[in-house]
Image: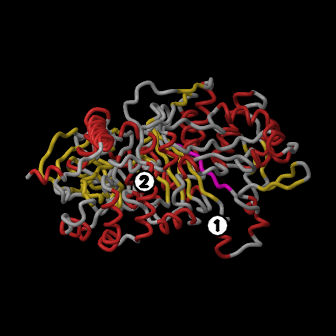
Amino acid sequence: MAYWFENEHRLPGSRLAFVSYLIVGVTLLFLLGFWKLQVVESDYYSELAERNRIRTIPLIAARGRMLDREGRVLVDNYPSFSVLLLRDDETEVERSLPEVSAGLGIPLEELQAQVEAARKMPRFQPIVLKPEASPADIAFIEAHRADLPALELIMVHRRRYPRDGFLAHVAGYVGEVSDLEIERSNGRYRPGNIIGKSGLERQYNSVLMGTDGLRRVIVNSLGREVGRLDQKEAIPGKPIQLTIDYDLQVVAEAALAGQKGAVVALDPRTGEVLAMASHPAPDSNIFAVRVPREQWRELNEDLDRPLLNRAIQAQLAPGSVFKIVMAVAMLESKAIPEDFTVFCSGIADFYGRPFRCHVYKKGGHGVVGLHRGIVQSCDIFFYNVGKRLGIHRIAYYSTALGLGQKTGIDLPGEEAGLVPSSEWKRRVLKQKWYPGETISVAIGQGATMTTPLQLAHTIGGIAMGGVFKQPHLLLNRGNVAETRFPLSEATTAKLTQAMFGVVNEGGTAASVRLEGIEFCGKTGTAQLISAEGMKKVAGKAAKRLTDNAWFVGYAPRTRPEIVVAALVEHGEHGSTAAAPVARDIIKAYYEKKSARSKQQFTVQYKFHELPADAPTVERRSVPASQGAPVELLAGRRNRP
């Protein structure tokens, strides 16, 4: 033992001190690291740990429904499922993409692009891979819960619109918010939000769009839910009630079926829009889920322009309907005597150029005054009126009566039309105005452009004695804006009597006379090309250049309850193409009014078919007051 101690190798003091200091230093580093983890960065690592076991699942709020004026559902929702890709674990996401691609039928490149685009988003915010999951998608996700924890299903509420384009341009459609819309929303929208893109969906998006909720759940290492923490319920959007009368809308859609055009019916006393249809129209249900790019391209390139709401966006020459505005200018300006007459031989010369009347082949109208000029729609009479008034007076009265400007209807995208003037031509075209142009403007041709809604608004306001209520689609919206123009009672009386004569005194719309109803109106036929030019075209080109047909009608003769403007593009004659459309709507209005007085609910013409998804109702036939028999629908509809 002594030998051992005598030969023991002892460490030098300096080395022993170094080792001691090293041990102390490492210990201090560990302590510093623990302090940093536990104190300085505790919140950060707590959040990471929380994310590993807690998953936030969004609860999508349902959009508010749209109801007609009687409370019937026009636009509703139906439950569906969306496929989400949860991005809490980036490694897991990258690993699972090939299998997700194969299982859901989404190209891998598309998935990778979506993941890459979402990198700037918070990691807790999932990606919507499929807005609407198919039964096969749901089965795949449920079968692979264990090996694909990044996939999740959430219930959503899809929009359900009436089929086949019914009310399509009024209701509009919804779609996924774009990057630009997110940028302009000041934080209101997030990627994946569904918002209104057109029509009332867009106009009242803030009302219809609810507030999404969320559910926090506890998941295990396989991503399966094993418990719930808390839940913030989604707040549904509010419903809106429209001025639309579903029954009149059915008639309007049916009357336009197979034709390109638009029709607007409104109550000139209140400005409430009772019906509005534009054809052709897309089925809005295709927008309830993501629209395929090819289908979207076809809609935009279609020559018939189904995405155009012709009721408020078709800016076309109004034809002879404009003669009512000319008559107002003649009577109110006092520039021309009330008893002014001309002789119509069918053709007349103005500024060295011949201008024809529409009856020039029949030898003309003979002696024509204002009343007969409106009833028979004599072009020669209004050529002379236009020449004597001049373009300045015509432009002034046209603008004062609501043309050349937006009506202010609560729909996005309304166009203003155009009232030409010498000042407009000088400013826009850098050209002078020629007197011969005034002759064309006098019968609603030339550069004059109006929309169907504008004509309904203007003619309705004139029939109301110069009171123009702002058209609107939201029922009970409170104070409705109005514009007043001081029309004399004598002027109103002369014009309403003349428009009554158009329908009831053998005028241009005599074929649509309604027995027992003071149906008044004015026909219009607007040329798209001169008669000489028309001779040079043929086939499809000739069809697309055929005259447009217009008619604006109202009832009764004084203080009208309904005014209808109908446009049939390339319909050729307002009396035969557009006037019957307005007649059907006004007839249905009075039939319904009569039925309501007998405590019955809905009037529906037999030849107007309801949408395919209409519920079964009890039907009983009753005799109509005149014309074809009608059917009364006993009971209210839940949805169209």
In this figure, which residue is indicated by the disc labeled 2?
A: 118
Residue 606, position as x, y percentages in the image? 32, 60
Q: Residue at x 40, y 70 (%)?
A: 108
Residue 14, position as x, y percentages in the image? 33, 41
Front position among marks 2 and 1: 2
Q: Mark yes or no: residue 514 visible.
A: no
Residue 430 appears left or right of 500: right
**Within the image, what quadrant is residue 355 found in?**
bottom right
Q: Residue at x 40, y 26 (%)?
A: 478
Name the colour scheme.
secondary structure
Residue 113 appears left or right of 210: right
Kindly identify which numbered label has been placed on residue 562: none
Q: What secondary structure is marked by label 2?
A: helix
**Within the image, what quadrant is residue 133 found in?**
bottom left
- Is 188 in front, or is 7? 7
- Is 496 in front, or is 115? 115
Query: Which region is colored magenta?
Result: 520-526
* Cα distance between the residues tagged 2 and 1: 47 Å
What amino acid is found at the position of numbered circle 1 in the picture? Arg
What amino acid is found at the position of numbered circle 2 in the picture? Ala
In this figure, which residue is indicated by the disc labeled 1?
A: 544
Taking the magenta stretch, the answer to whether it contains residue 351 is: no
Quarter of the figure that contains the C terminus: bottom left
Farthest right residue?
352
